[in-house]
Image (cartoon, rainbow, N blue to C red):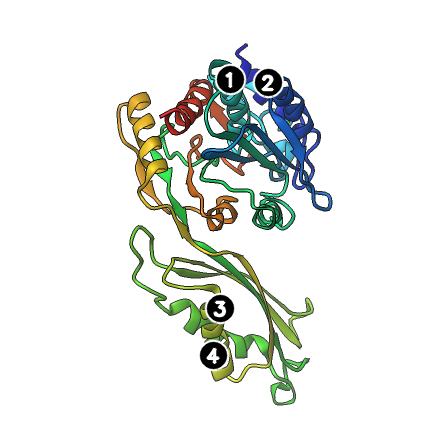
């Protein structure tokens, strides 16, 4: 059994459902310490955050990942236990196989191999891991980035191991992400009997015209290297459970994914203007998940593009699609950031998996990126 397969299996076997790290970072910290890395925990609340570095000064290259996973869902839907890593038909199955314990294991192998081959390398090689990427993302990299900003810790280049590939490893490189803004709207009405609507005020009826306006709006036509911004309603809840009662309130959850043509506060103003114009009585709580970012075509993108060309014979597609990742907290530190990882076809699903040949190629890929950036 290869080292990267063994380490990935060991990580999957630890049921680190967010925000529980389940001992993953302790395992990796001990291993990296033996390889000469300086390791320390930057924990907040119940969230574990590992910062491991080798070398000092010069350019700082950070590999960024997370040890937490999403819940497995119904165990009976899995062909094998999600926390018993299983190899069959050329794939490794288990929760976190693709998102992202395989990348984390590959990071560690790549860092060990790089340091063994280049013990006196220039610059600083780093690994940052959190157990709060799949959850609220409050006490993880968000807080670590605030700590780095306060202490002056610099990051020049950052490679995030999120599963970015579409069909083949390395066929897509994320070079930015849209911003994310969530709202929880409560529209207040007056509860009453459905037979006497004149004595009540139906918050569902009041909310729908405003929601129709918001969801029908074209927010923009896109932005260079970004798709158009969009608003999606994800949940509507109202009612007492009886079909003859007009509810007293209606709750609506929605989310914006937006490009750099917007900022969160501007979107918030636009939504409030629509709700006010429709005369709603409401409360609205916002959560700003992160502003959009784009890494310009500089040293990092060029280095990763060249490595992928060498390893796979083709340059990757480079775009800003997909959801969000912890990269959104590192980019504002002034770092060039990209995301490169396994095929994402099975992430967050039952029977999550990674192809074994894909897994075996990851450590060399990440090591080559480090060598191109720190040794050039």
Determine which quarter of the picture holds residue 204. bottom right
* Quarter of the C terminus within the rendering: top left
- Label 2 SS: loop
Give the residue pinned by disc 3: 265
Q: Residues within 10 Å of mark 1 (few under 14, many from 20)?
A: some
- Label 1 SS: loop
Residue 214 falls left or right of residue 107? left
Residue 115 falls left or right of residue 135? left
Q: Are marks 3 and 4 in contact (CB under 8 Å)?
A: no
* Quarter of the N terminus within the rendering: top right
* Closer to viewer: mark 2 or mark 4: 2
User: From mark 2 to mark 4, how far is it between C-alphas?
Assistant: 57 Å
Q: Residue furthest top?
A: 1
User: From mark 3 to mark 4, how far is it between C-alphas?
Assistant: 12 Å
Rendered residue at 63%/80% (across/down)? 189
Q: Residues within 10 Å of mark 2 (few under 14, many from 20)?
A: some
The mark total stands at 4
- Label 4 SS: helix
User: From mark 4 to mark 1, how far is it between C-alphas?
Assistant: 59 Å
Q: Is residue 210 visible?
A: yes
Rendered residue at 50%/30% (across/down)? 124
Q: Residue furthest left?
A: 314
Q: Are marks 2 and 1 in contact (CB under 8 Å)?
A: no
Residue 35's tag is 2
3 w.r.t. 45: above or below: above
Give the residue pinned by disc 4: 273
Give the residue pinned by disc 1: 119
The picture places residue 60, in percent across and down from the top left corner, at 48, 35
The picture places residue 236, in percent across and down from the top left corner, at 57, 64
Q: Earlier in the sequence, mark 4 or mark 1?
A: 1
């Amino acid at each position: 059994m290869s080292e990267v397969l063994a380490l990935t299996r060991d990580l999957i076997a630890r049921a680190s459902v967010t925000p529980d790290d389940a001992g993953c970072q302790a395992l990796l910290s001990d291993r990296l310490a033996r390889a000469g890395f300086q390791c320390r925990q930057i924990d907040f609340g119940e969230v574990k955050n590992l910062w491991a570095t080798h070398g000092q000064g010069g350019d700082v290259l950070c590999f960024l990942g997370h040890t937490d996973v999403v819940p497995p869902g119904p165990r009976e839907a899995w062909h094998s236990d999600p926390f018993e890593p299983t190899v069959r038909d050329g794939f490794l199955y288990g929760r976190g196989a693709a998102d992202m314990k395989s990348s984390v294991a590959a990071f560690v192998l790549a860092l060990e191999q790089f340091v063994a081959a280049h013990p006196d390398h220039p610059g600083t090689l780093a690994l940052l891991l959190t157990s709060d990427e799949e959850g609220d993302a409050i006490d993880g990299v968000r807080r670590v980035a605030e700590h780095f900003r306060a202490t002056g810790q610099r990051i020049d280049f950052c490679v995030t191991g999120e599963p970015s590939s579409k069909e083949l490893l390395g066929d897509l490189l994320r070079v930015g992400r849209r911003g994310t803004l969530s709202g929880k709207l409560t529209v207040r009405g007056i509860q009453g009997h459905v037979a006497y609507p004149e004595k009540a005020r139906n918050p569902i009826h009041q909310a729908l015209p405003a929601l129709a306006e918001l969801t029908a709006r074209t927010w923009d036509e896109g932005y260079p290297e970004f798709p158009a911004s969009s608003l999606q309603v994800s949940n509507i809840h109202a009612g007492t459970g009886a079909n003859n009662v007009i509810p007293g309130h209606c709750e609506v959850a929605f989310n914006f994914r937006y490009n750099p043509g917007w900022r969160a506060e501007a979107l918030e103003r636009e939504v409030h203007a629509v709700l006010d114009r429709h005369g709603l009585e409401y409360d609205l709580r916002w959560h700003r998940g992160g502003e959009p970012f784009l890494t310009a075509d500089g040293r990092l993108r060029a280095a990763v593009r060249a490595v992928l060309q060498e390893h796979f014979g083709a340059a990757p597609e480079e775009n800003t699609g997909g959801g969000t990742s912890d990269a959104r907290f590192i980019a504002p530190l002034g770092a060039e950031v990209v995301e490169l990882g396994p095929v994402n076809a099975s992430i967050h699903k039952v029977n999550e998996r990674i192809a074994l040949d894909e897994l075996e190629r990851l450590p060399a890929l990440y090591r080559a990126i480090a060598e191109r950036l720190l040794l050039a």
